[in-house]
Image (spheres, rainbow, N blue to C red):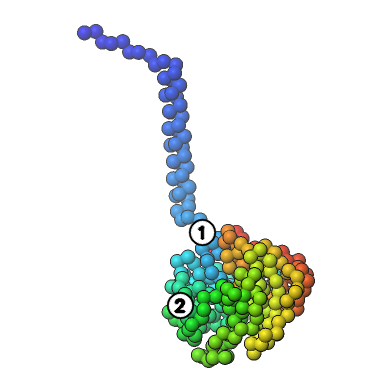
Amino acid sequence: MAPKPVRKASRKQKVVLLACGSVLLALLAGMSAFLMLAEANPEAPARELFQDQRKIVYTGNGTIFAVDRDGTLRRFQHTGFEKGEKRWGSPPGRAAGEGWQRFVWLIAGNPGTLYAVDFEGRMFLFDHLSDEMDADDGVLVKTGIPAFKSFTGAYDVFYGLREDGGICWYRHLGAGTWAANGDCTLVKRGMRGYDRLVATGQGVLFAIDAKGELHWFRHLNSALGGSNWEGDGYGVNSQGWAADLAVTSLDGIVYAVDSRYALKWFRYDLPQVYKKGLTGWHNGGGFLLPAAGLSG
């Protein structure tokens, strides 16, 4: 039998074959480039500072403690804390402990101490100068703390914002001793419109409402728990705080983690003195980003 004649590819078939060949060459070239890049960069790029943190607390002198999503406690030393400069101790974000996802509130105490409150309302005291601080290393100093809308404090004085707008005051006197036997001392009413309190020391509280407006208040009897306050009727001191995931302050330095996990720095120059509008804030109320572009 005579062999069948070989049919020539049609013009349409040639176009398809050429297109397939071009796609294959492109895939091979892309794979080659990917393999070269992987060889040159065997590790994934490091994440920026505070990209993994969900809770932060500022304890003074540039020290920030932060809790990762997996419960790892990290210590950051911001050497540029006075002016918000992009200067950090090395290594930034050093792991300091594990198991910290059990805590709902982190609060600065006196210099060298840190308080943490778990979901059962138990408060533990930590010496944060130690190299290792696992969640189980704290000393139990109080039980029965209510599920406050917001809980804050500074220098061993604490404020809890209730759903009804009342503010409870507590003061830790040392060991297991508390003023007023550790019971809630109702020091203020009428704060129902606020979602968050941020203590910065000396009785000064920044109160943030649902619109993200920040108001300045000062508890005039912060050491005794009286009901005299300054700040009622004062105007708004700042705006744009509603989307921040965490806000912490001490001695007028304020850090906030926004919805994109960027760290923002502010400074209220004279915390004990009310200044109208933005005039009390360093840099006219503008924030700096001291951790932007830095990785740990």
What label does residue 109 carry, if any?
A: none
- Percent x, y of residue 165: 62, 75
Q: Residue at x 57, y 90 (%)?
A: 179
Q: SS at mark 2?
A: loop
Contact between marks 1 and 2 (CB within 8 A): the answer is: no
Q: Residue at x 46, y 56 (%)?
A: 43
Image height check: is 119 above or below 172?
above
Can the viewer see residue 62? no
Relative placement, left or right, of 24 versus 247 is left
Mark 2 closeness class: few <14, some 14–19, many ≥20 residues within 10 Å: some
- Percent x, y of residue 222: 66, 85
| Tag 1: amino acid | Ala
Q: Residue at x 44, y 41 (%)?
A: 31
Can the viewer see residue 14? yes
Q: Tell which circle, 1 or 2, labels the residue nearer the N-terminal end.
A: 1
Depth order, front residue of 289/4: 289
| Tag 2: amino acid | Glu
Depth order, front residue of 146/141: 146
- Percent x, y of residue 216: 71, 74
Depth order, front residue of 218/87: 218
How far apart marks 1 and 2 lie (CA) works out to 35 Å
In the orientation shown, which residue stands out farthest toward the left? 1
Q: Residue at x 61, y 78 (%)?
A: 166
* Residue at the disc numbered 2: 120
Image height check: is 25 above or below 217?
above
What label does residue 46 carry, if any?
A: 1
Q: SS at mark 1?
A: loop
Depth order, front residue of 158/253: 158
Quadrant of the drawing holding the N terminus: top left
